[in-house]
Image (tube, helix red, strand yellow):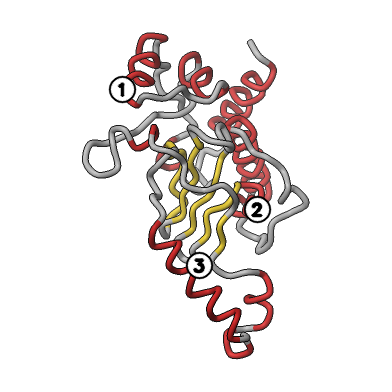
Amino acid sequence: MRDWIKRIIETLQYLRVTDRDKAVFGSWHHGYRLDSPLSHDDIRKLEETYELSLPEDYPFTVRYYGLMTILAGDGPVGPRAPSRPFPLFAPFQEMTEEMWTLGEKDWSEEMRAEYQERQRLWRELDFNAGSLLLADYGCGITTSVVTNGPFRGQVWLLDPNVNRWIPFGMASNIHYADEDEPGDDRESVYMFRDWYEHWLRSSVEGFEGKS
């Protein structure tokens, strides 16, 4: 068994036994239980259907350990949405740090024009293309694993409340209720297993802080 898989399973077992009152957010739903693993044929058929090749660590976990359930529906967002090109070549934030710092009343005309252009670009983005949903944090905030392009395999966070679509490291504080700003890992690249272990660590810390 790979070391990181062993860590994940041991941590899930620890939380399942100790968090009896389901104090960690979302635990009342998943109960720290694993889904049934997918077979090699299941994954091959899924990749053929979506016309994609899943990032390496993602199919390994769903095949052998059932850590995630792969979801994709029919209709405008599927079933081929993950095979469409991921629409970004850089993190997108509708408001720059300078805009946030100044406040709208103090923006220059150039900044107002830039903001309007960013609003236009946001409306044109295909939020289902090139990714598979991993988690829904509520209030429309989600994380997905990118399935193609230069960021293939990375986990990105989509937040329609402030119109940003960014690598998870730039918003990793979402796993910590008491943190309003990203930590020192804002430049870190989170692949699936990095994101999953980060969530588990924050769950343990959150539970132990409440107990």
- Give the residue type at disc 3: Arg
Residue at 64% of width from left, 44% of height from top? 202
Q: Secondary structure at mark 1?
A: helix
- In the displayed structure, does residue 60 sit left or right of residue 3? left
Residue at 57% of width from left, 52% of height from top? 166
Question: Which label's residue is closer to the chain start, 1 or 3?
Answer: 1
Q: Quadrant of residue 95?
A: bottom right
What crowding class fits label 2: few (fewer than 14 Cα within 10 Å), some (14-19), or many (20 or more)? many
Q: Nearer the viewer, residue 121 or 28?
A: 121
Q: Spatial distance from mark 1 to mark 2, Cα to Cα? A: 32 Å
Q: Which residue is mark 2?
A: 170
Q: Quadrant of residue 120?
A: bottom left
Q: CB of mark 1 within 8 Å of CB of mark 2?
A: no
Q: Secondary structure at mark 2?
A: helix
Q: Which residue is mark 3?
A: 118
- Give the residue type at disc 2: Met
Question: Which label's residue is closer to the chain start, 2 or 3?
Answer: 3
Q: Nearer the viewer, mark 2 or mark 3?
A: 3
* Residue 51 drawn above or below residue 15: above
Q: Nearer the viewer, mark 1 or mark 3?
A: 3
- Give the residue type at disc 1: Thr
Q: Secondary structure at mark 3?
A: helix
Furthest-left residue in this view: 75
Residue 129 in the image: x percent, y percent? 40, 42
Residue 34 in the image: x percent, y percent? 46, 25
Residue 144 in the image: x percent, y percent? 48, 41
Q: Which residue is mark 1?
A: 49
Q: Spatial distance from mark 1 to mark 3, Cα to Cα? A: 34 Å
